[in-house]
Image (spheres, grey):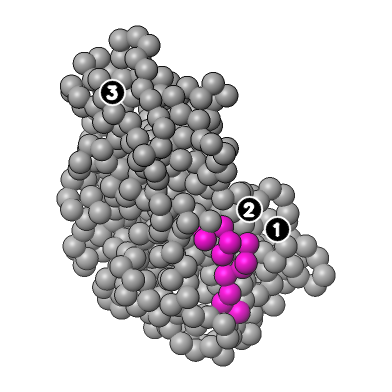
Amino acid sequence: EKRNSVALEHGAHRLGKRSDTFMETWRNYGLGQFIHWGVYAIPGGHWDGKYYPGAAEWIRSWKEMPKDAYDNLYKQFDPKAFDAGKWADQAKDMGAKYVIITTKHHDGFCLWPSKYTDYTIAKSPYGKDIIGQLVEAYDARGIDVYLYFSIIDWNHPGYRSSLKDDADRKEYETFKTFTRNQLVELLERYPSTKGLWFDGSWDKAWIEQAAFADELGRELRDMVPGLIIGSRFRADENGNRHFDTNGDMMGDYEQGWERKMPETIADTHGNDWDCVMTIPENQWGYHSDWKGHVKTGNELIEMLVKAVALDGNFVLNFGPDGQGNIRPEETRLAAEMGAWMDKNHEVIYGCGYLDWKKQDWGYYTVNRKTGKKYMVVFNTPVSGALRVKTPSKTKLETVYLLENPDADIAIEEIHRNEYFIHYQPDTPSDKPFVIVMETTGSA
Ligand code: JFZ
């Protein structure tokens, strides 16, 4: 692989992973909560008796949605049930170590009282700063806050998705200033922010702003020590996003895993990464009437474990309704994950990839600091024999069930560096279970 073959001014500014303690903290989260909330929660995927099949937070772009009606929804935004502490408690009970909150989605509506536009929570009947309440509630529970910010802003007069002439370019300058001002404002208002989760950065107009975005990133990083920004923020001077012209990632972690996951460690390019996931198929904001497959608790737990096993974080999305209620289906799933995390969180927090041959029963994880190794079993073989292949010179000495260290379980060495672990649950378990492994020899 040829590296740095082209000299770039606005490409990656670092090769390889960040090694500071801020990024260490990020890497060790394992599980996060995503919140998509805005005025789109009011129509909830319906307008005028018609059903919008797309993602509810995109309803403004639907041909059946009158733009004017949408842009006046904020006059009805009065979420009487909103209780920041309740959302944060639920995140905590689920086991989330960080939260990503939409400060402003593509529609441009601001959940904080921005002084740079009137299209904010301050002008709604609700009136109070929502981001401020959430930051305080999550901070108080030790859950790190990351702010989601959409570059796309359908409300700002200077916003363009592409720049066709000088008039567009002139207008877009006002939008760039506005974008910069809002981001500085957010970090000034909420200085405990650990990072920014950018979105809506795929417009041609924005891709052409490599120098501006690079400088803005630098300015924001100067404001908050250790600030974390993913790869979905800026493009290089050749218009390459996420990865620059030389194939090097721009930003602190790969932000391309959206409702999909890497299959192997090779797919991750050795980068830090997060996977953001919806519970239904593709709904981020509140849609009152989910259609299609809704993920089960076990599916979500498997995604979480898989993410950690491949050195990533898993971030599960919640879309509260127009009154500020988290829907019952989401609350139930959060509780189901939380119950599993209660017993098994040590295979998640601080853990990552173990370089052993993957087996069909599930996933290995390893604690990065202590080296403690785990098997998370999702598929129990009918034989009751779980295969483990160790690297040369590594000997499997002891295994025990995390939940019940006295349970009957035995190791049989079947070849050099190959073992069967004989274990059959008395009653077939309806949740993945964990086996702790102790080894001798090299890691
Ligand atoms: C974006 C938004 O448009 C969407 O509403 C939601 O906020 C989500 C988290 O982000 O949607 C995307 C962004 C990127 C990809 C797909 C959907 N992608 O890279 O494949």
Q: Viewer-proximal residue, 89 or 270?
A: 89
Amino acid of disc 2: Pro
Amino acid of disc 3: Leu
Q: What label sits on residue 280 in the rendered view?
A: 2
Q: Position of residue 265 (x, y in %)?
A: 38, 30
**Residue linked to disc 3:** 396
**Mark 3 and mark 2: span between their CA atoms?**
40 Å
| Residue at 27 percent of width and 41 percent of height | 367
State the SS at label 1.
loop
Indicate which disc, 3 or 2, sits on the residue closer to the N terminus.
2
Q: Position of residue 118 (x, y in %)?
A: 49, 84
Q: What label sits on residue 290 in the rendered view?
A: 1
Q: Quadrant of residue 236?
A: top left
Q: Residue furthest top?
A: 415
Q: Is mark 3 within 8 Å of ligand 1?
A: no
**Mark 1 and mark 3: span between their CA atoms?**
47 Å
Q: Position of residue 135 (x, y in %)?
A: 36, 74
| Residue at 40 percent of width and 45 percent of height | 403
Span highlighted in magenta in the image: 323-335
Q: Classify 53 as above or below 235.
A: below
Could you tell me which quadrant the N terminus lies in?
top left
Disc 2 crowd, CA 10 A, few/some/many (<14, 14-19, 20+): some
The reply to whether the magenta stretch includes residue 352 is: no
